[in-house]
Amino acid sequence: MNRIAKVACGLLLCALAVSCGGSTSMISMWSDPAYTSPPVQKVLVIGLGENEANVRIFESAMAKQLKARKITAIPGTSVFPFGAPIDTTVGRQYCQANGIELVTITRVVGISKESEYVPGTSYYTPAPAYYGFYPYYYSSYSMVSTPGYVREYQVATVETNVYSLKNEKLVWSGQSQAVDPSSVNQVIGDFSIIFVNQMAQSGIFGKK
């Protein structure tokens, strides 16, 4: 399994502006225009994936970002058995009993292999001119060229949905992409930051 596939399956994951060496960026977002809420106090964070360790890391990373906004976040793996479907009745009863207001569910929706052609360059460099103006003037210029090449990279697309427990409806959804992330921990951290920031900007957590 290649590196990005491991990152993605491991998310849950796993899976700020594009830059060389890997990046994470928001590619789409939707929020319910009719949604309003008082300041949110508790959120249940659920990650879906094959690797339990990385799911736990992701849920912890999301919880950390929410805690920074003075929101109590409960990782799903701390409540429900990993890898087992959550019984609807049990899940509803838990959320009601513990005052959960929002539930976030994150999953990897795709891994794609991309490529781009990086064109070569050509430029002139003057010949050495150690002996004054005239020797330099009559000397020739030399051309330096670098060949073009095809760069291949992979992209992981991750989706987070937010549901309000008030009416059990979807109130926010967003997709983010990671381009050649350098490590699982880095991409998990980047996804948690970008998702929570976008949720906050959309007013999903209510006004503090």
Image: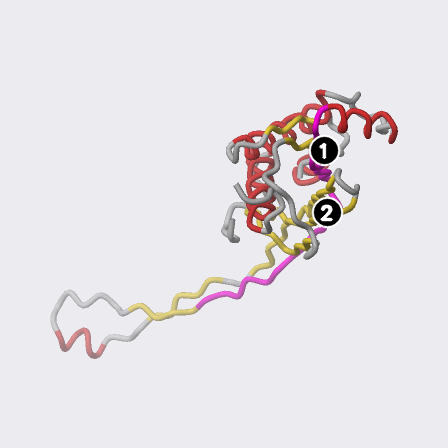
Residue 165 on the magenta span:
no
Nearer-N-terminus badge (1/2): 1
Element marked by disc 1: strand
Q: Quadrant of residue 89?
A: top right
Q: Amino acid at mark 2?
A: Ile
Q: Position of residue 50 (x, y in %)?
A: 77, 30
Please state if 145 lies on the left or on the right of 175 as rendered.
left
User: What residue is shown with label 1?
Assistant: 47
Q: Amino acid at mark 1?
A: Gly
Mark 1 or mark 2: which is in front?
Answer: 1
Q: Residue at x 52, y 46 (%)?
A: 21
Label 1 to label 2: alpha-carbon separation: 17 Å
Element marked by disc 2: strand
User: What residue is shown with label 2?
Assistant: 111
Tell me if residue 152 comes above or below residue 146 in the rendering: above
Nearer to me, 149 or 207: 207
* On-image quarter of the N terminus: top right
Q: Position of residue 204 (x, y in %)?
A: 63, 46
Nearer to me, 43 or 125: 43
How many C-alpha atoms fall within 10 Å of the one at disc 2: few (<14), some, or many (≥20)? some
Q: Residue at x 57, y 34 (%)?
A: 66
Residue range in magenta is 98-121
Q: Position of residue 101 (x, y in %)?
A: 69, 35
Say how the picture is coloured.
secondary structure
Residue 108 on the magenta span:
yes
- Helix, strand or loop for the magenta stretch, by majority: strand
| Numbered badge on residue 77 | none
